[in-house]
Image (cartoon, grey):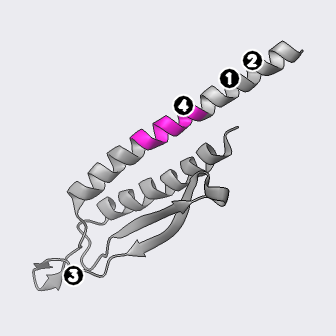
Amino acid sequence: MSEPNVSALSALGVAQQVSANNIANADTDGFKASSVAFESGPEGEGVRVADIRRSTSAGPFVDGAEGSNTDIGRDMVDMISTGHAFSANVAAVRASEEMTGHLLDMIA
C-alpha cells in the first residue's frame, strides 16, 4: 500500500471531523471553532496532522451571550475540498494495490 496516501487519509479524516464538529456547534453559545494544521510526514512523504488549533476570536453577541465563532461557509468549503482530497488519495491507494496485484500475478 502507498504509505504516504494512507497517512493522508488519516489526516484528512481528522480534518473532516473537526469541520463537522464546528458545524454541529455553530448554534452553541461560546463555542470556539477549531482548525487543523498539516505537516509533511516522515522523510517529507505524505501528510499528517501537526496541530488542532482552537480559535480565540470572539463570536457575535446573541441575546446577551457570546455566540459561536464558527464560519459555516468556510467549514462547508473545507469539507468539500477535504472530501475531494480524500477521494484522490483513495484512488491512489486502489491503483497501488491493483498494480501490486498484477505484479504478484505475473510472478506466480
Please state which amino acid type lies under the numbered disc 1.
Answer: Glu
Query: What residue lies at 31% left-to-right and 76% top-to-bottom?
Result: 32
Using a 10 Å C-alpha cutoff, classify the residue at mark 2 as few (fewer than 14 neighbours), some (14 to 19) or many (20 or more): few
Circle nearer the N terminus (3, 4): 3
| Residue 42 drawn in magenta | no
- The answer to the question of whether label 4 and label 1 lie on touching residues, with beta carbons closer than 8 A, is no
Question: Foreground mark, 3 or 4?
Answer: 4
Q: Which residue is mark 2?
A: 102
Residue highlighted by disc 1:
98
- Secondary structure at numbered mark 4: helix
Which segment is the magenta one? 84-92
In-front residue for pair 33/65: 33
- Residue 58 is tagged as 3
Q: CA distance from mark 3 to mark 4?
A: 40 Å
Q: Amino acid at mark 2?
A: His
Rendering quarter of residue 37: bottom left
Q: CA distance from mark 3 to mark 2?
A: 55 Å
Residue 61 lies, with reference to residue 103, above or below; the image says below
Q: Is residue 37 left or right of residue 10?
A: left
**Residue at the outermost left position:** 63
Q: Which mark sits nearer the N-terminus, 4 or 2?
A: 4
